[in-house]
């Protein structure tokens, strides 16, 4: 004799009811489910916005940016008061740090909308071969020092956010052709001792009205052969209005006392 099949009865309560089930009272439960989901979504949005605001809000620094030496103070004043500033001198004098910190200040205060950091993709005496990844990945190794400066002044979260959204751009010098630097841009050309005269001319002719441009380099550490674009530009542009040439000396090094002694030995006449 065949056994009767038993149908398992499922009793739904308000928490178990799915809004799209077709049983009695589903419309009422569906409306309640939607209201509950809407309330949850609203609370999640508020929480997410609060998290983003916290993550990307520029931190308040206990130690404000200030010059460590009289030479740095003159260099900072020159950048603030001129359209084009050349920072010349040996390693450790704060050329890159001062320019990067001023750019971070300008971006944080809203005076500019974009920082462009560029340098020639020249290796210092050795061949690294082909680097993996896209252009940004390949060039990132050249701007790590500048990235560290921005991390210190703005915070890592802000820097990564600005990099993703084009507020901070790192690009090889060769990709500057065709660009125009406007008043909302702060441009830094670092390691300019490795620029050829033609590359320097191309870069200088990108400068637009009221743009802030800083060019740093040490002509005694050039890794290229032939004419040097930094030396050529300094000689040709000296005395022009809106152009300032600041030269650091070995005694202006703030990296360490040992660096000053090393420079004395290597550059002794």
Image (tube, rainbow, N blue to C red):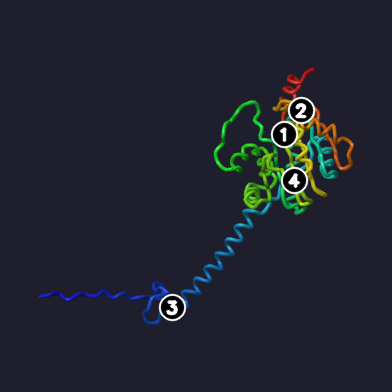
Q: Which residue carries the number 2 mark?
A: 227
Q: Where is residue 74 in the image (x, y as percent from the top left)?
A: 84, 38
Instruction: Say which element carries label 2.
Output: loop
Q: Where is residue 28 in the image (x, y as percent from the top left)?
A: 44, 81
Contact between marks 2 and 4 (CB within 8 A): the answer is no
The furthest residue to the top = 269
Among numbered discs 1 and 2, the one appearing first in the sequence:
1
Q: Is residue 134 left or right of residue 85?
A: left
The furthest residue to the bottom = 24
Q: Residue at x 47, y 77 (%)?
A: 32
Q: Residue at x 63, y 47 (%)?
A: 156
Residue 191's disc number = 1
Closer mark to the observer between disc 2 and disc 4 = 2
Instruction: Say which element carries label 1.
Output: loop
Sort mark 4 into few (<14), some (14-19) or many (20+) by Cα contacts within 10 Å. Answer: many
Residue 98's disc number = none
Seen in the picture, residue 94 relative to 58 is either above or below; the reply is above
Q: Nearer the viewer, residue 88 or 73?
A: 88
Sort mark 2 into few (<14), some (14-19) or many (20+) by Cα contacts within 10 Å. Answer: few
Q: Which residue carries the number 3 mark?
A: 29
Closer mark to the observer between disc 1 and disc 2 = 2
Contact between marks 1 and 2 (CB within 8 A): the answer is no
Q: Residue at x 87, y 43 (%)?
A: 242
Among numbered discs 3 and 1, the one appearing first in the sequence:
3
Instruction: Say which element carries label 4.
Output: helix
Closer mark to the observer between disc 2 and disc 3 = 2
Real-space Cα distance between discs 3 and 1?
68 Å
Among numbered discs 2 and 4, the one appearing first in the sequence:
4
């Amino acid at each position: 004799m065949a056994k009767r099949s038993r149908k398992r009865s499922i009793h739904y309560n308000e928490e178990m009811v799915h809004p799209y089930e077709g049983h009695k009272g589903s419309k009422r439960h569906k409306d309640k489910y939607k209201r509950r989901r809407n309330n949850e979504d609203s609370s999640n949005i508020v929480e997410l916005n609060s998290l983003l605001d916290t993550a990307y809000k520029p931190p308040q620094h206990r130690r404000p940016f200030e010059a460590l030496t009289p030479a740095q103070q003159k260099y900072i004043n020159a950048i603030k008061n001129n359209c084009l500033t050349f920072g010349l001198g040996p390693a450790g004098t704060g050329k890159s740090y001062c320019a990067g910190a001023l750019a971070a200040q300008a971006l944080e205060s809203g005076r500019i909308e974009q920082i462009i950091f560029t340098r020639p993709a020249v290796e210092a005496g050795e061949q690294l071969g082909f680097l993996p990844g896209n252009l940004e990945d390949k060039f990132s190794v050249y701007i790590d020092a500048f990235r560290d400066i921005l991390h210190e002044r703005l915070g890592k979260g802000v820097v990564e956010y600005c990099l993703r959204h084009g507020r901070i751009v790192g690009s090889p010098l060769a990709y500057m052709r065709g660009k125009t630097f406007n008043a909302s841009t702060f441009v830094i050309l670092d390691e300019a001792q490795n620029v050829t005269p033609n590359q320097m001319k191309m870069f200088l002719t990108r400068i637009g009205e009221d743009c802030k441009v800083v060019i740093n380099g040490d002509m005694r550490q050039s890794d290229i052969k032939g004419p040097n674009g930094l030396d050529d530009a300094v000689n040709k542009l000296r005395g022009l209005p809106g152009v300032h040439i600041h030269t650091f000396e070995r005694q202006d090094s703030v990296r360490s006392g040992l660096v000053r002694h090393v420079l004395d030995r290597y550059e002794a006449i």
